[in-house]
Amino acid sequence: MKPSLILVCLLCVTVTAAAQLFVPANQLFGRADSLRGQLTPLRTCYDISYYHLDVKVDPDARHISGSNLFRFTAVEDFSRLQFDLFDNLRIDSVMYHGQELPFKREYNAVFIDFPAPVAKGRIDSFVVHYSGHPVQAKRAPWDGGFDFKKDSNGKHWIATACQGLGASVWWPNKDHQSDEVDSMLISISVPQGLTNVSNGRFRGREDLGDGYTRFNWFVSNPINNYNVAVNIGDYVHFADTFHGENGVLDLDYWVLRENEAKAKPHFRANVKPMLRAFEHWFGPYPFYEDGYKLVETAHLGMEHQSAVAYGNKYQNGYLGRDGSGTGWGNKWDFIIIHESGHEWFGNNITASDIADMWIHESFTNYSESLYIDYHFGKRAGQEYVHGNRRGIQNLAPIIGTYHVNHEGSGDMYNKGGVLHNMVRTIIDDDEKWRQILRGLNKQFYHRTVDYGDIVDYISKHAGKDLSSVYAQYVRHANIPTLEFYFNPDGKVFCRWIADEPAFNMPIRIRTKGSKYQFIQPTRQLTPVSIPGLTRSNLEVDTFNFYVGVLVNE
């Protein structure tokens, strides 16, 4: 057979809002990776319900010291457990009912032994005291740790960002996304003249009498560890409110003193339109109790729950650029829209293993298109998704390796957004699709999920088995190719060439100028029953379907 038509997708790299580095697919994993990524009995034996993190930050010395209280419920009888803290930080003591517990360290894991078994069902606690010089992020947020900077007036301007690397890079915790605390008190002490802004509601400040002020913030909703944030600077505060689906949502903005005048109109132009669009598509903002904040940072941005880090320099696009090349991405501030989209996908719905980070990033990438859809129309949103294809590389799957703290490829952003647009097109009912997106956020409200949870829910409520579609685009690097055969007798056949053995995605085709019709190819040759279809007038909907097309004689 002789190929006469091949549609090839452009594979060039553009800038994306990656919140972390991606490990090569051929990475060999070791003991340290397993300790960080695996849920062993020493981690599943206790369920964390509350933290009180109390940390003093010395900006000049780039040093931190403090404690974290772990309140937990014993899931089973145990005498030993594991928590996590990077080994460059010193553990000064682990205290349990006034008694210092022995501990052992292996890589970044810490093992403590209790003087007597902790009985199943018991609510108990211990406190870890620690200190040291935390890892300094060299290129936050793509690497993790403390980002020590100064503003244009020479005042300290500091933030944390640790997605992927892990929250234990700067504070002790059970560092696995599967176990979110129900609530948390964050107390950060900083030199007088500086302000700390963290997640949740402000609970007041205390003068410690030693030149430091402690700022207390309380999070009343479940929060994953990497979202817990320190933001220190010469901040000014202004506020607003949004009347949304669940009532009045408080909007709080913390920006450098020098940027207050430009921040007010810019935030006004972006935040409420974002909330209107996302509540329409995804349901109520998930953290009304904790409010919504934007906090200016020296790094580009991160989805820190209820305290979104913002560093896009008060401009539209991604640092003034539109990665889609369509122009639609320059009509809004990328960081505000993308990072706030994570409040629904990433913070409300959280992947239990970082291998499923594609859930966070694919839906949030797609949220950019839905923002455009809401304000500029469906065609505009789909043009944006289509334009983002030029950033897809198709070199590795967008799902990572489970139990070793390994993410999939950076294609989880743009390829993930393309995938969800295809699913919407397959469902062919925009209101049903909207209810599926809202239903996901209701069904998995403040919960952790995995690949199966998401795919099964969408398939069930779409009324279509979409498992092979998700498997092909999530678990494999290659995109499928739709192959056509035109026989001399006028009969037409087609089939999918795909990595997924049972791949059977429906797709839209037409004769040129007519209305698109769905066909249901499989991996086997299937007749195509569209009157008048020829090699020259065949059109496949490659605008909405990210596939290759091969036409043979």
Image: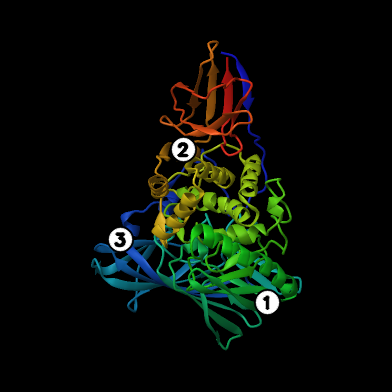
**x, y percentage for residue 299?**
66, 61
Q: Which residue is mark 2?
A: 469
**Quarter of the image holding residue 538?**
top right
Task: Give the Cα separation between the discs numbered 1 and 3.
Answer: 43 Å
Q: Is residue 513 left or right of residue 199?
A: right
**Mark in front: 1 vs 3:** 1
Question: Helix or strand or loop: what does disc 2 sit on?
Answer: helix
Asked if 195 appears above or below 177 in the picture, the reply is below
Query: Is residue 23 among the parts visible in the rendering?
Result: no
Task: Give the Cα separation between the discs numbered 2 and 1.
Answer: 49 Å
Q: Amino acid at mark 2?
A: Val
Task: Give the Cα separation between the discs numbered 3 and 2.
Answer: 37 Å
Callout 1 crowding tier (Cα within 10 Å): few <14, some 14–19, many ≥20: some
Q: Is residue 438 left or right of residue 254?
A: left
Q: Amino acid at mark 1?
A: Asp
**x, y percentage for residue 380?**
65, 48
Q: Which residue is mark 1?
A: 234
**x, y percentage for residue 319?**
71, 56
Asked if 154 appears above or below 370 in the picture, the reply is below
Q: Which residue is mark 3?
A: 45
Label located before the other in sequence (1 or 3)? 3
